[in-house]
Amino acid sequence: MLQAATDTAITPCVVRECRGARGCPRALLDVAEASAAIAEMLDACGASDTIRRRVKGPLLEHHRFKVSVSGCPNACAQPQIADFGLIGEERPRVDQSACIECGACVEVCGEGALELTGTGLLIDARRCVGCGSCIAVCPVEALSSERKGWRVLMGGRLGRHPRLAAEVMQGASLDEASRMARAVVGLWVREGAASERVGATLDRLAGMEGESLALTQTEGERASALALLLKREGPSS
Ligand code: SF4
Ligand code: SF4
Ligand code: SF4
């Protein structure tokens, strides 16, 4: 008989990584390296001590600072509902003069983002999710990386008031993503209220208090406001 899973040793911070850390062939970037870097940064910022100090009573799942790292846009570790999340991405560019119009990239693209026309290969950037599969199958290297790096997400959560994370950066190097993580965690350590999740702290500080006001913001506006806030915090320093 199946038993209910119980977590007897809840830690204040948790870093979840997808199978990319253990050799998933779809991983575009080094998931284990990114997880280790963010975990180290959480330690250095005192995130665990902050949670222990703020939480009165037993530590519960919703108190934890959740980091999630996925090696490709399949996002198996669910970074969209983490306090801080990373997703590996690789966007293609085409060298039309090298393309032999074999159609392999069109066939492999599950998003319908590629089309062979009489004049060459068209890439629809709005449909492309950055999985990099087309680049990998091109037999003549007519496709290469336009951009390869981490998408940086923050402020996701489930619970009573579920919310998807806002995406504040694309194509970030691990160094840039780590600096962004340090900025957001530093801000939350200093300014967060008791039991307040990162997303709520960021929204409050970005002048978007109240769920109804937040709901009037488009995802792009929210992401821009958070990026501005973090820029002031000095993520590039
Ligand atoms: S997110 Fe991508 S790299 Fe990670 S386990 Fe899923 S398919 Fe593999
Ligand atoms: S990167 Fe992925 S989604 Fe984008 S065009 Fe290539 S195969 Fe399609
Ligand atoms: S796989 Fe390469 S050569 Fe074939 S159509 Fe695509 S870009 Fe052109």
Image (tube, grey):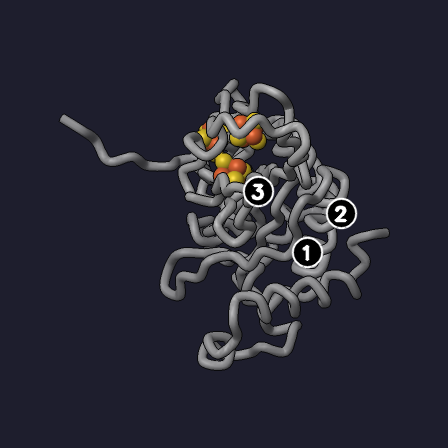
Relative horizontal placement of residue 224, taking residue 108 as reference (left or right): right
Q: CA distance from mark 3 to mark 1?
A: 46 Å
Residue 94 visible in the snapshot: yes
Determine whether label 3 and label 2 are within 8 Å by CB: no
Circle 1 SS class: helix
Q: Amino acid at mark 3?
A: Thr
Q: Amino acid at mark 2?
A: Arg
**Nearer to us in this view, 190 or 59:** 190
User: Up-down: is 70 above or below 27?
Assistant: below
Task: State the image coordinates of residue 4 (x, y, percent, origin top left).
Answer: 24, 36
Task: State the image coordinates of residue 97 (x, y, percent, origin top left).
Answer: 68, 32
**3 or 2: mark nearer the eye:** 3
- Which residue is painted at 77% across and 62% down in the image? 231
Task: State the image coordinates of residue 106 (x, y, percent, origin top left).
Answer: 46, 34
Residue 184 — which label?
A: 1
Q: Amino acid at mark 1?
A: Val
10 Å crowding of disc 3: few (<14), some (14-19), many (20+): few
Q: Quadrant of residue 7?
A: top left
- Which residue is painted at 50% across and 26% down in the image? 102
Q: CA distance from mark 2 to mark 1?
A: 9 Å
Residue for badge 3: 119
10 Å crowding of disc 2: few (<14), some (14-19), many (20+): some
Q: Quadrant of residue 221?
A: bottom right
Residue for badge 2: 179
- Which residue is painted at 58% across and 59% down in the image? 198
**3 or 1: mark nearer the eye:** 3
